[in-house]
Amino acid sequence: MAATASERKLLIGGEWVETGSWVDVRSPYSGDLIGRVAKAGAAEARRAIDAAEAAMQEPLPAHKRAEILVRVAGYLGRRHEEVAQTICAEAGKPLKAARVEASRAMSTFTMAAVEARKLTGETVPMDASQAGVGKLAFTLRQPIGIVGAISPFNFPLNLVAHKLAPALAAGCAVVLKPASQTPFSALLLAELEAEAGLPPGWLNVLVGPASEIGDVLVEDERVRAITFTGSGGVGWKLAERAPRKRVKLELGNATPVIVEADADLEDAATRLAANAFSFAGQSCISIQRIYVQRGVYDELLSRFLPKVEALVVGDPADEATDVGPLIDADARDRVLAWVEEARAGGAEILSGGDLDGELLRPTVIAKAGPELKVSCEEIFGPVCTVTAYDTIDEAIELANGTRFGLQAGIFTRSIKTALAAAQQLEFGGVTVNEAPTFRADQMPYGGVKDSGNTREGPAYAVREFTEDRLVVVELS
């Protein structure tokens, strides 16, 4: 059994391990200590890889992998409120959003179970060439090997699920390093995996400095794949340091939305207000840049700003709260500094821009030049800009005008305009008449340019954790 919720151990090789040193976890809202977790380092990382290697000596058949994943989804359902409360406490995520995350994790495991059952190769048409006549050929999908998974704080359960569930579906053991700010959700999930019948060593969870744990994952040749969600600077360095591994990156964005003159402005304003500030903007696809056709700019603002100002800022455990705290004071101070830089650069603060107690109010900025950080870098806070444009070509150029390319959106009643924008916007995903913050867990999710090099979603990720093996049979 694991230790109590307020004091947790690491999971290595099926055993809950104490190391003698601890990582404190504090509430982003109150600053109170909510618990501590045993701190891992390089030695624990090597032990975890040893355990994963030993586990894979006895492969799990696909039906067992699927059964375990389905049971985990069921356990998440039965303990849904406990899981949501854990997310809320450690991440400062408003409770109603934490409940959505818990439900989405159930979906992620369920879909991964489906993929475990249907993971297969393909036949090769050998008689398509003279050399292949008389031969039968097909491919097998083989597990790539041990997977190192590094997850961020902002979705402490579901982003772990998006790494863990497809890797297990593919037949790979995992060494997981969740964010040190939010480890409890991952450790709770590890408990559920064990209860669901996952054998020892197939999942190992380490909490501690990335500089130590990450170095071991990069350097140990037994780790064949690394899946990372986080900052671009860290992610691309991981890829550079591990050229012989499959390094899959899901990174940041400065998410744009285009609002055409023919759009349903009330619907657009409602979706923009909800999705620019949810979880205090701490999502890779939180709306950051809004481009509005000049003829409807004032009308859109007249609908949008009251909805922003009606958002409830406060304690994330309060059922009414829409916007809670940033993850820590450093993050809050950085976002405030970017807002002040925009103000000093001639931008106009239309709403927010200051604190409600220790919490940053939802902030809307107009006349922000493209060179300002709030316009071209990922702010990861409850801030968005609004800018008028004249032509759709101008709007698309503005939307494409950053180094990021994760998701973008457009609101329009014109299918021609929507499809043209979908082709011209340089992003991994484009939503039409929906906020680009939208994500369903079965869809291919990922970016281009500096936003990453992979597609998550169980049907897509599971193949990233396998390799093709060709089999050729001489029939004569």
Image (cartoon, rainbow, N blue to C red):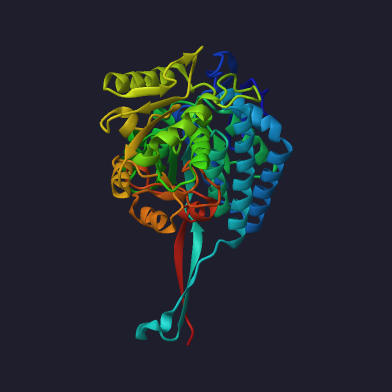
* Residue at left offset 56%, top offset 14%: 30
Viewer-closest of 474 and 331: 331
Asked if one can make out residue 178 in the rendered structure from this viewpoint, the answer is no
Query: Toward the viewer: 380 or 348?
Result: 348
Q: In this view, does 305 lie above or below 217?
A: above
Residue 165 in the figure: left or right of residue 349: right
* Quarter of the rendering occupied by the N terminus: top right
Q: Nearer the viewer, residue 392 or 278?
A: 392
Question: Measuring 48% from the left and 45% from the top, which residue is drawn there?
Answer: 147
Residue 246 drawn above or below residue 307? below
Q: Where is residue 228 in the image (x, y as percent from the top left)?
A: 43, 40
**Closest to the observer: 475 or 298?**
298
Residue 404 lies, in percent from the top left, at 34, 41
Q: Residue at x 57, y 52 (%)?
A: 169
Residue 402 position by quadrant: top left
Residue projecting furthest to the right:
78
Q: Where is residue 451 in the image (x, y as percent from the top left)?
A: 37, 42
Q: Is residue 109 visible?
A: yes
